[in-house]
Amino acid sequence: MARVFSGIQPSGELHIGNYLGAVQNWVSLQNEHECFISIVDYHAITQEYEPAALETRTVEMAVGLIAAGIDPERSVLFVQSHVPEHTELAWVLTTVTPLGELERMTQFKDKSQRQESILAGLLNYPVLQAADILLYKAGLVPVGEDQVQHLELVREIARKWNTKFAPGFFPEPTAQLSGARRIIGLDGQAKMSKSLGNTIGILDEPDVVFERLRPAKTDPARVTRKDPGDPAKCNLFTLHQYFSPPAVVKEVDLKCRTAGWGCLDCKRVLADNIVSHFAPARERARELRASPDRIRKILKRGAEKARRVATQTMREVRDKMGLAA
Ligand code: SF4
């Protein structure tokens, strides 16, 4: 049974891209593995953010995760900043991480282009990721394709630290790519992301789901209702394949190709199927939001469990590095 580490930023909204691309997989992993799932607020502060909203976003992400099926009794669900050993190990790991490796990370290059003055936190982001994973000596890390490069760096950092201080101490984690899918947002272009405003939240109320879908991009060939389309060129057809029953997917395919209906009709059916798919999650979220103390207790208990492992790892790391006891 491999130990698994996964992290998600506290964007405040668990959207269907997070769900299909990651969380659905975590829900099944928790049946077979010991899973550590962290809401990574220290990562979130490497970009512009609203301090007054961060705590609410963190709690809302916890609500979303539990509503989506993460079971705090089976998985260790916690907030990254509640376990200070993450930043302590990150500092330690910066001492074995080559600067050039950090500078060549694709995500750093992309994100730093959007910053007027490039902050060290953004550069060191992958070192904190390495600490997140190595702190728990996780053997398996579910990642999307855009994170493969970071995981390779985590492996390299583990190797460098092991070579210098204690051979074999940190396992080199393996990427689990199979469950991770890249879900395109409603703009039909970029990966679904809260910051791009191209999402549907899994907890969105039924009318909101349709309102979000209404302006979504479809096959550009469907200029008028009479123009036939090609489902392969429409991102919403992909979503139908996830949320609509096979018979409906077939019907969508046919009606799209033959202009048997308009895109708005197609979106209405998709909205209904998304809404019914997440009805149990919305119900669970309603119950959780009604007792905020319960969520806080779950996160506190999760942090306690995580710290039991994290403090032991750091004790050993300090010892092997000759840091005074
Ligand atoms: S009919 Fe449906 S699948 Fe075809 S382009 Fe419109 S929204 Fe997309």
Image: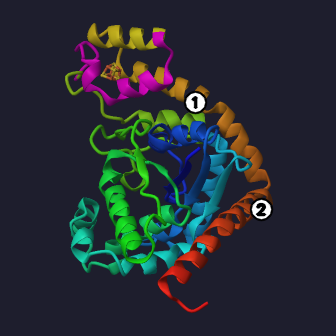
- Residue 275's disc is 1
- Residue 255's disc is none
Is residue 117 placed above or below 242 in the rendered structure?
below
Q: How is the image coloured?
A: rainbow
Query: Which of labels 2 and 1 is toward the front?
Result: 2
Q: Which residue is mark 2?
A: 297
The amino acid beneath tag 2 is: Lys
Check residue 263 for magenta coloring: no
For the residue labelled by badge 1, is the local secondary structure a helix, a strand or a loop?
A: helix
Q: Residue at x 72, y 38 (%)?
A: 283
Sequence-wise, which precedes: disc 2 or disc 1?
A: 1
Residue 325 placement (x, y as % from top left): 61, 90
**In the rendered image, is residue 268 in sight?**
no
Would you identify the image quadrant in which residue 313 lies?
A: bottom right
The amino acid beneath tag 1 is: Val
Residue 74 placement (x, y as % from top left): 70, 46
Residue 294 appears left or right of 248: right
Would you identify the image quadrant in which residue 188 lies?
A: top left
Residue 52 placement (x, y as % from top left): 57, 73
Which segment did they paint magenta?
223-246
Q: Residue at x 22, y 23 (%)?
A: 223
Check residue 235 for magenta coloring: yes
Spatial CA span between label 2 and label 1: 29 Å
For ligand 1, which image quadrant applies?
Answer: top left
Q: For disc 1, does the CB lie below 8 Å from ligand 1?
A: no
